[in-house]
Image: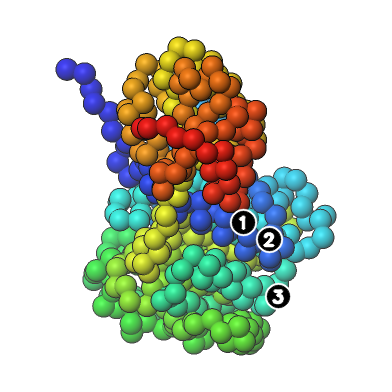
Amino acid sequence: MTQRFQAPRGTQDVLPAMQPYWKAITTAAEEVTRLYGFQRIDTPVFEYAALFEKGSGDTTDVVEKEMYVFEDRGGEHLALTPEGTPAICRAYLEHGMASWPQPVRLFTTHPMFRYDRPQKGRYRQHTQVDCEILGSPDPLVDAEVIELLWRIYERLGIRNVVVRLGSIDDPEPRRTYVERLKDYYRPHLDQLSPDSQRRFERNPLRLLDSKDERDLPLKEGAPKPVETLSAPAQEHHDMVCKALEAVGINYIVDPLLVRGLDYYNRTVFEITPLDDERAQSTIGAGGRYDGLIEILGGPPTPAVGFGSGIERIILEMQRNGVELPAGHRIDAFIVHMSPSAHAVAFRLGGELRAAGIATQLGESGRSMKSQMRSANAASARLAIILGEDEVAAGTAVVKRLDTGEQATIQMADVVAQVQEAVSADPDAILQGGGSRDS
């Protein structure tokens, strides 16, 4: 029996009905990032696996469990990109962006790949909007990227959300806190999940990021990183808070927020729905990562950024009642009903498209009634009808499909009349008079 293929588990086909959401999100991202001075960058779909093993941290779920790693035919150890930040940092170093005017503001929309448990809005292949500011230690830059993401959501009709804001200090002062955290968890090690038991020695901070049911009861009683900040980190955190308040962004300080990647320091944040109790409800998240460029072999370079999955954004748009009309797929549908009309119709289609008018031709040999049904199914604005009589007279019948009104127009005037009709005044096509039954 012939195998019936389906999309791999954890992937999806983005069908035409959903394309308006994708277009709205990418357009909003492009417009808002432009207002904040960002430039677009595109990095490869795959990178050397060591980039993420070193950059994201070898104790993170991304590296331990989720990366798609493979060896190519040349023996190179590669990975499909699981997250955008290390790749953009690699490009920053490789292309000498440290010599550009600082800070450098970069954004992208990029497919990401993680071998994760598929669930609604969470796919093994998903697409992220990713924004990074490299080369500034200013806490106002942290607030700025949070505001930027907030404005994207705002433009897309997502309203009922909150910024969960935290801080995990800098690596040196954080060591004292980590020892306190280990002292708290040490008597309870046998109650923790196997992942948390393993991370207790290698990266104890990740215990606060665990979503495992066995770990949750102990989290609330753990010492909170945001309550033990060094003076510089506290000052940084306070300025971020004041900046968000100044622009009216709804935020709460989450004392347990640490995020799931090893490279963060100081500011970390997530944006989540206020009324959604899903375990995986975060729409977008990010933070400051002043040490990542240095980990990757570059000079010390302060940086901050975020990622937001387009699939998650669509879910929130729909939950907020945002409906996007499909609109007209095409402007004009050419109905041609005799052999003498085929070549004329084909030439007219090319002329209309050259004038920027989306045009579709009916299928040769089908009846006028059948082609008109196709015109309506295509949500065309106008039908242009060509039969033997029209070809002989050098005319065409142009019909509005919303009202049924129609006019006979000289062939030499069809492109100009149709262009005017679809761009400004649909009634202009009726000036020629005449009729054609359908």
Q: Residue at x 73, y 59 (%)?
A: 104
Q: Relative to 149, say whether 401 is above or below.
A: above
Measure how far apart labels 1 and 2 are at the Cα level: 6 Å
Amino acid type, residue under disc 1 in the picture: Glu
Disc 3 marks which residue? 138
Q: Relative to 7, say whether 57 is above or below.
A: below
Res 34 label: 2
Looking at the rendered structure, the secondary structure element under dot 2 is helix
Q: Residue at x 72, y 45 (%)?
A: 94
**Could you say which quadrant of the image residue 358 lies in?**
top right
Q: Earlier in the sequence, mark 3 or mark 2?
A: 2
Can residue 417 be seen here? The reply is yes
Task: Characterize the local packing of mark 1: few (<14), some (14-19) or many (20 or more) Cα atoms within 10 angstroms.
Answer: some
Disc 1 marks which residue? 30
Task: Characterize the local packing of mark 3: few (<14), some (14-19) or many (20 or more) Cα atoms within 10 angstroms.
Answer: some
Residue 359's x, y, as percent? 52, 33
Amino acid type, residue under disc 3 in the picture: Asp
Residue 43's x, y, as percent? 61, 44
**Could you say which quadrant of the image residue 371 lies in?**
top left
Q: Earlier in the sequence, mark 1 or mark 3?
A: 1
Residue 350's x, y, as percent? 59, 26
